[in-house]
């Protein structure tokens, strides 16, 4: 074998005629992959923009309203718990004279007839008859017996209380009311909050109303 010519690289096999075609194919495949990736990215960006436009057009997301409060689960005041320990405060009989005009104010926490209107829990009101009316923060229920106990009253305050604007004719047969006085007024006066059992004993010809009152202090 002749010696290689100095300065000439060693002999190598000539390139295969298919190698150029394979290289071109690979380059084309790479370019195609890049194009597919770019197209996919463009589609994703477009879809996101469409979704955002639709969301903005529909306005803010709806907020689910709060569920109604379960009143049975809400703790009630001491006056509404029939098992509370009510301490007897006093028992009195009162004559409530009809006013010449307007109403007679009655503070049941003391008790006092002719009280200031700001501290009154109830009124004897005269207009085409005589009626009892009560303050907005006073709870009132009718009872079947003048011997009712404060626990009996408390069991009815949240289920059978009269409307705040109720007017009760004093000549109602066997009228017996259980009244939970205004806590705010009692605190303002620095006196005990009361449950009062009121029983109408008689109504005289001149309109004077004789009532018996029995009161219990409400634990707080």
Image: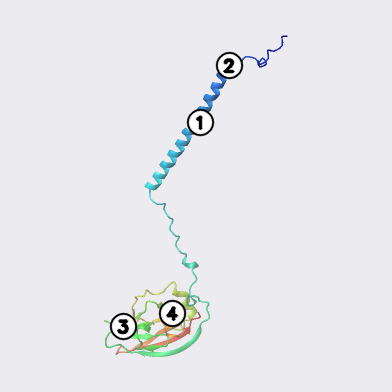
Horizontally, residue 147 falls left or right of residue 15, namely left
Q: CA distance from mark 1 to mark 3?
A: 93 Å
Residue beneath the point at 44% across and 75% down = 157
Mark carried by residue 34? 1
Q: Secondary structure at mark 2?
A: loop
Q: Measured from the top left, where is residue 117 in percent x and y?
A: 34, 84
Name the residue tied to disc 3: 125
- Could you tell which of marks 4 and 2 lies nearer the N-terminus? 2
- Could you tell which of marks 2 and 1 lies nearer the N-terminus? 2
The picture quadrant where one finds residue 194 is: bottom left
Circle 1/circle 4 CB separation < 8 Å = no
- Could you tell which of marks 1 and 3 lies nearer the N-terminus? 1
| Disc 2 crowd, CA 10 A, few/some/many (<14, 14-19, 20+) | few
Residue beneath the point at 48% across and 67% down = 72
Circle nearer the viewer, 3 or 4: 4
Mark carried by residue 48? none
Which one is in front, 69 or 8?
A: 8
Q: CA distance from mark 3 to mark 4?
A: 23 Å
Q: CA distance from mark 1 to mark 4?
A: 80 Å
Q: Secondary structure at mark 3?
A: strand
Q: CA distance from mark 2 to mark 3?
A: 117 Å
- Could you tell which of marks 2 and 3 lies nearer the N-terminus? 2
| Disc 3 crowd, CA 10 A, few/some/many (<14, 14-19, 20+) | many
Circle nearer the viewer, 4 or 2: 2
Name the residue tied to disc 2: 18
- Could you tell which of marks 3 and 4 lies nearer the N-terminus? 3
Name the residue tied to disc 4: 183
Residue beneath the point at 46% across and 89% down = 90
Q: CA distance from mark 2 to mark 1?
A: 25 Å
């Amino acid at each position: 074998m002749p010696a290689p010519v100095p300065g000439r690289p060693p002999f190598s096999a000539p390139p295969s005629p298919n190698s150029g075609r394979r290289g071109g194919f690979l380059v084309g495949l790479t370019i195609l992959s890049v194009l597919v990736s770019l197209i996919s990215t463009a589609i994703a960006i477009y879809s996101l923009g469409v979704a955002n436009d639709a969301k903005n057009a529909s306005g803010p997301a709806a907020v689910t309203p709060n569920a109604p409060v379960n009143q049975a689960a809400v703790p009630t005041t001491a006056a509404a718990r029939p098992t509370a320990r009510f301490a007897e405060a006093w028992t009195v009989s009162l004559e409530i004279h009809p006013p010449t005009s307007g109403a007679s104010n009655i503070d049941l926490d003391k008790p006092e007839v002719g009280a200031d209107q700001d501290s009154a829990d109830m009124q004897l009101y005269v207009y085409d008859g005589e009626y009892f009316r009560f303050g907005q923060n006073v709870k009132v229920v009718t009872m079947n017996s003048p011997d009712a106990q404060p626990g009996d009253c408390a069991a009815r305050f949240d289920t059978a209380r009269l409307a705040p604007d109720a007017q009760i004719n004093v000549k109602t047969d066997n009228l017996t009311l259980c009244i939970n006085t205004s806590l705010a007024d009692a605190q303002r006066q620095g006196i005990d909050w009361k449950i009062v059992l009121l029983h109408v004993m008689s109504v005289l010809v001149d309109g004077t109303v004789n009532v018996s009152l029995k009161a219990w202090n409400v634990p707080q």
